[in-house]
Amino acid sequence: MSRNHRPLYLLAGPTASGKTAKALEWAAQTGGTILNADSMQLYADVPILTARPDAAERTRAPHRLYGHLDGQTLWSTGDWLRAARPFITEALEGGPPLCIVGGTGLYFNALVYGLAEIPDIDEAVRQEARAAYDEMGEANLRARLKQHDPQAEARIMPNDQQRLSRAWEVWLQTGRSLTDWQNRTVPELAANSYTLDILHPDRAWLYERCDRRLQVMLDQGALDEVRALMDKGLVDDWPIMRVLGLIEFVSYLQGETSLEDALALARQKTRNYAKRQSTWFRNQFK
């Protein structure tokens, strides 16, 4: 086996950085399994928009935790970790090596640094936190959270209602910041069990990849995916709405903007997201 003969290969990086190709190359060399660590590739209805490995790619290696959630299902980092553990255990106990690949940084944080054992949140508190987001708006809730948990506010990406509300509900429930809870964790993985590889591509190259990939998605039928979701009753608070490009293409299909403008905005948001991911990974895994 390559990668220092360790059973786990953690492969992270920003969107469009070439993770899928590198994971498949690793699988060909090791005979290993690929496990998804991208929160959006968990959703079944958007294989094109999330650049999920296609049928041909999936025949080249076993793939796990891809495309099994519906658009209304909210999965936390803890949900993902619980689903990933059986595959991790199998690799650690002598089964095929495992490549954990994706761009969701909190999943890798949970593996390398641990996941906080936060007390259960009362449903009333959870509803209060969600109502605060709706009533105050993202900017005001961020400002409120920053007073109690500046680290969480800084690392939660824009438009991430799920994680912003989560940080606020933890403060409301416990009187302690989410960051404080997370600093009291034990790593999920032993340091000698994995190799961590974070892709840091050239920024100009990455942006060009982001732009080109969105056009390819349209050519492959991304708008059909969006129409199908709209037919299912897609609304703004579905977790799947965080998929890059989805909001813009919904606006186009609803006649609110041109396809050219929707594509331009989706490209800009994707580049911005890729930049934030790159910065986040650099800061978290030095």
Image (cartoon, rainbow, N blue to C red):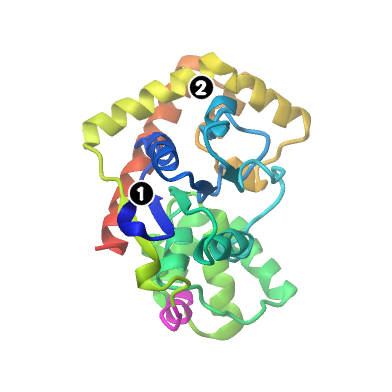
The answer to whether residue 77 shows anywhere in this view is yes
Which residue occupies the foreground of this view, 34 or 30?
A: 30
Part of the protein shown in magenta: 178-186
**Image quadrant containing the C terminus:** bottom left
Q: Secondary structure at mark 1?
A: helix
Residue identifier under label 2:
217
Q: Residue furthest right?
A: 232
Q: Position of residue 28 (x, y in %)?
A: 43, 37
Residue on which disc 1 sits: 277
Give percent across and percent down for residue 151. Answer: 36, 70
Say how many tags the image has. Answer: 2
Q: Using the image as rendered, state which of residue 111 and residue 158 is in the foreground.
A: 111
Q: Work out whether 20 lies above or below 187.
A: above
Counting from the top left corner in percent of width and height, residue 83 is at: 63, 60
- C-alpha gap between disc 2 and disc 1: 21 Å
Classify residue 81 as left or right of residue 150: right
Please give left or right for residue 50 compared with residue 3 in the image. Answer: right
Return the x and y of residue 133 as percentages of the image width and height.
58, 59
Whether residue 258 can be seen here: no
